[in-house]
Image (tube, helix red, strand yellow):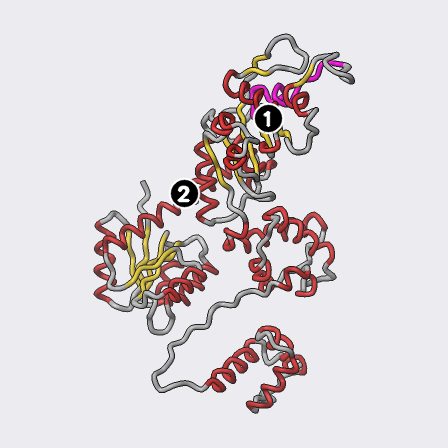
Amino acid sequence: MIRKRILVVDDDESLRWVTQAQLQQSGYVVDTAASGPQALERIRDAAPDMVITDLMMPGMSGVELLKVMKAAYPEILVILVTAFGTVETAVEAMKAGAYDYITKPVNMDELRLVVSRGLEHLALRDEVRSLRSSLNKKYGFENILGQSKSLLSVLDMASRAAQSTSTILINGETGTGKELLAKAIHFNSRRQGGPFVTINCGAIAKDLIESELFGHVKGAFTGALANKRGKVELADGGTLFLDEAGELPLESQVKLLRLIQNGEIEKVGAPAATKVDVRIIAATHRNLQAMVEDGTFRQDLYYRLAVIPLQLPPLRERPDDIPELVQHFFLKAKDQQRRSELVLPPPLIPYFGAYRWPGNVRELENVLERVVVLSRGPEISLEDLPEFLRRERPVADEFHFDLPPQGISLEGIEKDLIVRALEKFNWNQTHAARYLDLSRKTLIYRMEKFGLRKEQTGAGDEAVD
């Protein structure tokens, strides 16, 4: 078994030594660094599985180190150690990509527990990736992107359930990828060589649903000119995916229950039952438990379907996954539309994260395709985004500072922020004003108010608008 590698970063030598000794006793390979730059050198030499870093260090802080690491080494898990156990510190660390944080004085039992959980998370992530790589990619399992805990948990349960014969009920809002998950389960099961048959229970007229599901014999009703095999029989030896199972009428629910219990179906007009061997995966965006209570869904069928319930989280509950999904669908749309030269600037990504995506992943994919098709290029601008995205202004990282006891100058802070924004954009007033959520006219007024003017050291007109 390969032992996990951990890097401990702290400018306090005694704390580094104690932490290293404690973790080595737990069986980990532990290296240390006294500063952020030294830590980056250690990581370049031998990338660890996890980094435990102090928050307050001279030179490069723990959060600054975290941000650099997440840009260059996104696979490494980071735990921050802070003496300032405030909500603001935790929020900033989590937003920057930390897995967890602990407060000083460090309780070694707590540290070992957080480390153990973090490494379990890594193992889960690797297991899910292994599952993804083992599946037939043409069915799109690789599109179930994301590293959020809620999604990884569902995919882990799905990977284990795939090897069973139990029925599965996938709950999730429209567009969350229920059919994609059902296909992944089928193609990672012992039935992968058999058919995967889908029926959308909400897209078929109620008087035709039984014929579509179970089939019929010639002459069973007007228009039945020949024998017809239903979806269930077509799925014999494989998997039947019942999409929008909550739309099944009560009379059809009885026959579906018989299929699950006895492995047989009654074709419309047939004198005898037909034996079949199918595994059922059902999906719905509706609350079947509530439907049971109001009498529109059979309780016995619900319990038969929900032997293994899986709940796909909506996209608004996985905000950290949105940048990865945006990049994936952007590249996919570029390829489909043959626009390889098109660029999506990083500053536009937060606009996608600020929107709630009621249509979930499917809506996000459609929006990216629309942007790629309609943008004038070669770089997508803010004006190319749909109006509803531009309206949802991204929430900027919170600006935290300690209030000094002697008081502060509000005008001084305002002046400093304006200077920093202008310097960020090389004194381009249009960009700085947009960044500060001001009109250009207002920014110019405040620049004049504070006497702000870039020294003329060769800057072109572009720098000053």
Q: Which residues are magenta?
A: 226-240
Location of the N terminus (image quadrant):
top left
Side of 67 relative to 329 (left or right): left
* Secondary element type, mark 2: helix
* Secondary element type, mark 1: helix
Reading the image, the residue beneath label 1 is 250
Residue occupying image coordinates x 41% and y 85%: 408
Q: Determine contact: label 2, label 1, CB under 8 Å.
A: no
Residue occupying image coordinates x 52% and y 68%: 396
Give the percent coordinates (x, y) of residue 221. 74, 15
The answer to whether residue 119 shows anywhere in this view is yes
Residue occupying image coordinates x 51% and y 34%: 293
Task: Determine whether 447 is above or below 430 in the image.
Answer: below
Residue occupying image coordinates x 50% and y 35%: 289
Give the percent coordinates (x, y) of residue 26. 24, 48
Location of the C terminus (image quadrant):
bottom right
Q: Earlier in the sequence, mark 2 or mark 1?
A: 2
Q: CA distance from mark 2 to mark 1?
A: 40 Å
Give the percent coordinates (x, y) of residue 420. 52, 79
Q: Label 2 neighbourhood size at 10 Å, few (<14), some (14-19), many (20+)?
A: some
Task: Determine whether 242 is above or below 373 in the image.
Answer: above
The answer to whether residue 135 shows anywhere in this view is no
Is 415 in the magenta? no
Label ID, residue 124: 2
Q: Label 1 neighbourhood size at 10 Å, few (<14), some (14-19), many (20+)?
A: some
Side of 88 relative to 188 (left or right): left
Viewer-side residue, 445 vs 289:
289
Give the percent coordinates (x, y) of residue 5. 32, 51
Identify the amino acid type marked 2: Leu
